[in-house]
Image: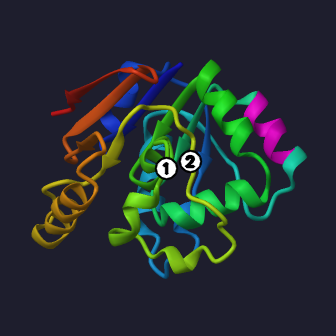
Amino acid sequence: MQILLSSNKEIIKEYIKENSKIGFIPTASELDDDKWYMEKDKKDLENMNFQVIDIDITNENKDEIQQKFNIVDTIFVAGGNCFYLLQQLKEKDVLKDLIEFANSKIYIGSSAGSCITCPSIEYAQKLDDKTQAPLLKDCNAMNLIDAFILPHYKSDKEYTKLCDEIMKKYNNLNFLPLTNEQAIIVNNREDYKIVNTK
């Protein structure tokens, strides 16, 4: 298992060879009118000379998704609404496949893609609109890390205030507030470290 959880993509070059095939999952951003952040992630990966292969969880069937999982070296899960992302993975019945991929190859999660690696995303309701995922029956997520991630910490005063409120409300959980200049390197569920990317 090698998992990178970060909003800063520069660190990726330290772990992935040039020309590697990266499966790009933009699903979390589907409901947004402006997808600039997702489009930037994809363009940045292409500019790093990776072979970027789109994986459309919503519109491709399970077999097509699994075939793409099999041919890529890395999967990059972009940001957006983590509840909608988790719903789509569960509706297409490929969440288990994504977990297996992360346990055998390299998984990269940005923002929502980081949050779904936690045991559950129930805590994120102040950050993302859960009503955008009306088919989501439970918030149990990938459980790849024994902690709960708060991405983009200190990026915005109001957003940071919401993160602080979440940590206060769920004070029994192990939170990892992550700035945009930090990444989490996960070797296994209980073996991880935060590193600075700048």
x and y, in percent, of residue 147 in the image: 36, 37
Residue 68 within the segment the image draws in magenta: yes
Please say if the residues under marks 2 and 1 sit with CB atoms less than 8 Å apart: yes
Relative to 186, residue 118 above or below = below
Q: Main secondary structure of the magenta part?
A: helix
How far is mark 2 from mark 1, CA to CA? Answer: 5 Å
| Quadrant of image for the C terminus | top left
Residue at 72% x, 55% y is 90
Kindly identify which residue carries mark 1.
120
- Disc count in the image? 2
Residue 179 within the segment the image draws in magenta: no
Q: Residues within 10 Å of mark 2 (few under 14, many from 20)?
A: many
Specify the quadrant of the image occupied by residue 153: bottom left
60 relative position to 30: left or right: right
Can residue 20 be spotted in the picture?
no
Magenta extent: 64-70
Residue at 49% x, 82% y is 33
- What amino acid is at disc 2? Ala
Specify the quadrant of the image occupied by residue 167: bottom left
